[in-house]
Image: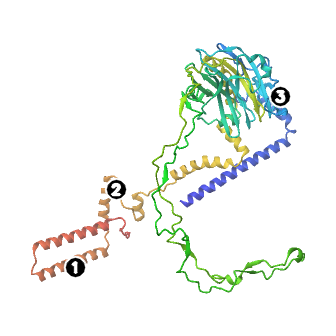
Amino acid sequence: MKQRWLLCAALLLVGNILVLAHEADDHDDIEDDVIDIDDDLEDGVEEVEELKHEVSTPPPLPKVTYSAPVPTGEVYFAENFDKGTLEGWVLSKAKKDDADDEIAKYDGKWEVQEMKDTKLPGDKGLVLVSRAKHHAIAAKLNKPFIFDSKPFIIQYEVNFQNGIECGGAYVKLISKGHEQHLDQFHDKTPYTIMFGPDKCGEDYKLHFIFRHKSPKTGKYEEKHAKRPDADLKNYFTDKKTHLYTLVLNPDNSFEILVDQTVVNSGNLLSDMTPAVNPPREIEDPNDQKPEDWDERAKIADPDAVKPDDWDEDAPAKIPDEDAVKPEGWLDDEPEYVPDPDAEKPEDWDEDMDGEWEAPQIANPKCESAPGCGAWQRPTIDNPNYKGKWKPPMIDNPNYQGIWKPRKIPNPDFFEDLEPFKMTPFSALGLELWSMTSDIFFDNFIICTDRAVADDWGNDGWGLKKAADGAAEPGVVGQMMAAAEERPWLWVVYILTVALPVFLVILFCCSGKKQPSAAEYKKTDAPQPDVNEEEKVEEKDKGEAEDEEEETNEEKPEDKQRRDGEAETASQDEEEEEEEEGGGEEEEEEEEEEDSKSDRKEEESVNRSPRNRKPRKD
């Protein structure tokens, strides 16, 4: 077995050497080609012309041709930016109120351009170009969206071309009435829905926030959807285009999809924080805890008395009276002594620094002794120590529980069973801060038909996905490209592919061939016992042949030994008969049966191929 493994290792080593040699030969061939390229240029041109029509070129990779998506139904807003301009979009000129003047301006740049590594020439989008700046841009809808009996759907694409450090790519749906001042769009501009990805640090979010108006007070309050259970990190880091979709239904249910896959869902009444509807009762803000309210669940037993033998002054540790000073203890030697090799520094000023003293070092005499200095008994726990006495705790008979303010009816209570009917909105805006540039937006759509949104997504994002898939190399190509960057992967490939194949061939095809019975008979070599799984006919035939050969070729020594054993047995029988006066016939029969069984055992042993002696010619 050890030789097999050594052989495997040797073959792997030879394979690696061949691969490296092949790469070196390819490199030498390339250099030779460069050197001889001027000499063979004319001949090469002629050969290419001759073989141009004979050799068939490999089929090109499939190409995906871009065509701008077109809405297949009624939409409130649709933008694919393929016109190459910001027509219809308004850049904000506002300032943030709570920021320094240097960064308060919305002076971040927006441009319409293709993606850096686009696979679809002609496909353009809106790009957030600058970093570490405030960006704000908005566009009006074809008509205001009013939440009634139809679903609401918003969908758009995002690509973090440079990844994302800290920043967002969410959209705001600007509430109706504020679309007339889009050039003043800022973070405080009222919106109805905020939706989209956002990330800072290691916190990856997919916002869905809507502002709900209280029918009782008229105030707006933000309601946040629960965090999705799916892992969102890959959408921010893979530098691919992803499709974000929000669907709100008149029955108050909602769905959030990424790349047409649901990552979060719920109900506006039960899965928003804080809840849409406030509680019916609230704690009375004017209620106060009574002064005699007792919240103590346990109190000290007032009837408990300290025992007379309780000694509060007993120390926790006492000297061990059974301890004995070790032999050889140096009582007169200090534990530390001045360093005899130390010297006073030359710049030491006794007037300023005081009298100089050599530094202390461990006493060298104490190294071989159990200890130095005055010996003291070690301390042990005091068995009589009890500490300070405290009365035991008992249940408080006056316990009233933890005090809470009383409940009163909520003066602001309302019950809105249709939170889907939100404030109408009339514009879409992007108000963002980002520490990363080149965030790509494309193919915005707002509609009420799920099929229209799906068609729009398939014609836009689906086309990008197909183009990326067509441009990506296959598995083998990816493995080869990875091996070019990391040559050590060749060893992994060889071990993964060649080693299993070699081991299968080694263990399946290198088994020892069992010699046949004829070969044993020719050489008279010892033959193994007959296997029980062999056929019955072969077994019987072999035994018959063995018996016949043993009968014909029995050695004289074996015959003499058996004859001697038989004579000895007969003599023993005669002596027993004489001693017993003839004995009984049953005993004679038993002895005869025993002798027969012994003979049979001897014959079976002699017939066994293991004990067969080589015959003499």
SS at mark 3 in the image = loop
Where does label 1 land, which residue? Answer: 568
Please give the name of the residue rendered at 45% of the width and 48% of the height, measured from the top-left corner: 397
Location of residue 232 by image quarter: top right
Q: Residues within 10 Å of mark 3 (few under 14, many from 20)?
A: some
SS at mark 1 in the image = helix
Circle nearer the N terminus (3, 1)? 3
Residue 375 shows in the view: yes
Q: Residues within 10 Å of mark 2 (few under 14, many from 20)?
A: few
Closer to us: 64 or 572: 64
Circle nearer the N terminus (2, 3)? 3
Amino acid at pointer 2? Glu
* Residue 532 coordinates in the image, percent (x, y): 34, 56
Where does label 2 land, which residue? Answer: 532
Where does label 3 land, which residue? Answer: 107
The mark lying in front, picked from 3 and 1, is 3
Amino acid at pointer 3? Asp
Please give the name of the residue rendered at 12% of the width and 80% of the height, measured from the top-left corner: 577
Q: CA distance from mark 3 to mark 1?
A: 126 Å
* Residue 9 coordinates in the image, percent (x, y): 62, 56
* Residue 298 coordinates in the image, percent (x, y): 49, 51
Location of residue 276 by image quarter: top right
Q: Are marks 2 and 3 in contact (CB under 8 Å)?
A: no
SS at mark 2 in the image = loop
Q: CA distance from mark 2 to mark 3?
A: 94 Å
